[in-house]
Image (tube, rainbow, N blue to C red):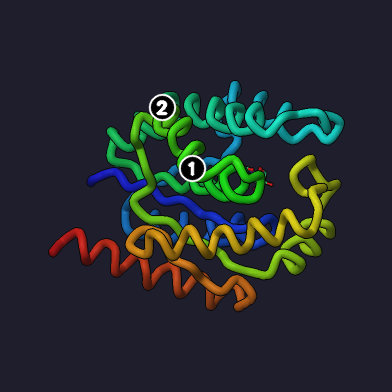
Amino acid sequence: MQGIFISMEGPDGSGKSTQITLLKDYLEGLGYETLVTREPGGTVISEHIRTIILNKEYTEMGYMTEALLYAAARAQLVTEVIAPALKAGKAIISDRFIDSSAVYQGMARGLGVDNVYQINSFATQGIMPDITFHLDLPAKVGLARAKGRAALDRMELESTAFHERVAQGYRDLAALDRNRIHTIDATASIEEIHARIVQLMDQYFKSKQD
Ligand code: TMP
């Protein structure tokens, strides 16, 4: 089997984890050995970097530092987990990847998408997801869900305006790459969202056979 790299993207509280669990079961049903990971995180080193990035005490963190730390966590994940898994023919589902940096740092922080891609092309060795699902929902809905779940981290504590730029940023980014990034209405039910993801996966596999 050929390896496949899938990323799940969207604002905080968009329901990515639930959909990842369902997608994993679906891929395993197709016979894929499936690995789930998350960003920032997924390796011992990347998880350590995550605790630094998301520590709400670090209010002095500069945007450039933030972007580079996300890229550093990503570089370790790619080297240690994603590249070897792809080589071994596994399916990998990542809860966030490079598009999160493009949107949160490039757009919402205002660093510029091109600058962020430049840093990240070094970190990812050019590895990009084969297919990306963008769970789209209004920023306020996502934040309310995140608030109900656990104590908010440094990013979640950002202003509503910041999270609105994130939600819109994803829509704009998806519009630039409709072949890879599929926008799904995340206000729909869990079952409806999963059904749409399965439909898009089937289309993807079919396009690979043609
Ligand atoms: P999570 O809560 O979905 O695990 O993600 C952690 C936070 O980090 C979330 O608010 C999104 C943010 N983030 C970025 O700003 N840039 C990135 O490159 C990644 C991967 C996440």
User: Residue 28 at what x, y percent from top left?
Assistant: 39, 54
Whichever of callouts 1 and 2 sits on the residue coming sooner in the sequence is 1
Q: Residue at x 53, y 30 (%)?
A: 71
What residue would you read off at disc 1? 98
User: Residue 29 at what x, y percent from top left?
Assistant: 37, 59
The type of residue carrying mark 1 is Ile
What secondary structure is found at the residue carrying circle 1? helix
| Some atom of ligand 1 lies within 8 Å of the CB belonging to the residue at label 1 | yes
Q: Ligand 1, what quadrant?
A: top right
User: Residue 100 at what x, y percent from top left?
Assistant: 56, 47
The one of 201 and 122 positioned closer to us in this rendering: 122
Measured in 3D between alpha carbons, the distance from the residue under mark 1 to the one under mark 2, in whole angstroms, is 12 Å
* Residue 81 visible somewhere in the drawing: no
What secondary structure is found at the residue carrying circle 2? helix
Does residue 49 appear left or right of residue 27 in this picture?
right
Marks 1 and 2: CB-CB under 8 Å?
A: no
What residue would you read off at disc 2? 122
Instruction: State the image quarter where residue 121 is shown.
Output: top left
Q: Residue at x 62, y 45 (%)?
A: 110
